[in-house]
Image: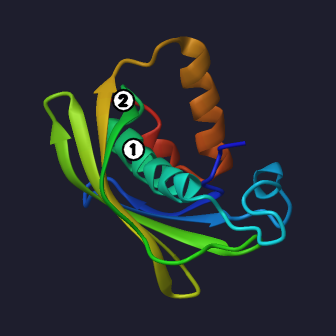
Amino acid sequence: YFQMVDRIEALDPAAGTIRTTCQVPAQSPVFIGHFPGFPRLPGALMIETMAQTGGWLVLAKLRFARMPFLTRVESAKLRRFVEPGETLNGEATLVHDGSGFAVIEAVIATGGQKVASAEIRYVVGPFPNDTIRGAMLVKAREIGFPEECLHAD
């Protein structure tokens, strides 16, 4: 299970900003081995949370005409552990969009404390197929993606 973003709290494609929330489950198979008797959200999933937050922003900016695919993570900093049951607040700002790629700067925090940050780069291209695009549209509506950002003009 890698769907990290539960809700889009604020999205402004024109300003290139987004805020999301993600509820870390109290129980998950990922905690069995990470770590036995000391469950913590893996750093890879913290980065995935930031990548998904930024990905939704890029999709909004592109109005679902093309899809961002994660290609690079730079300057990632993991500042503290994230425990089961915590709520993560994601924020991303678009710093580049064009020439077939997009770049965002992202942060996740919990309880007002920053837990991770990174610069994330995506290659932007056509949706591989209608099935993926359709599933993304369904998920977008489930998490509160603004309807006006779902369709190209």
Pick whichever, 93 or 27, lies toward us: 27
Residue found 54% across the figure and 23% down from its top: 133
Disc 2 marks a residue whose amino acid type is Ala
Q: Earlier in the sequence, mark 2 or mark 1?
A: 1
Disc 1 marks a residue whose amino acid type is Ala
Apparent side of residue 116 relative to residue 16 in the rendered image (left or right) = right
Q: Position of residue 84 (x, y in %)?
A: 76, 70
Apparent side of residue 73 relative to residue 109 in the rendered image (left or right) = left
Callout count: 2
User: Label 1, on which residue?
Assistant: 60
- The quarter of the picture where residue 21 lies is bottom right
- The quarter of the picture where residue 39 lies is bottom right
Give the numbered dot on residue 152. Answer: 2
Pick whichever, 83 or 106, lies toward us: 83
Q: Position of residue 89 (x, y in %)?
A: 54, 72
Residue that lies at the very extreme toward the top in this rendered image: 129
| Badge 1 element | helix
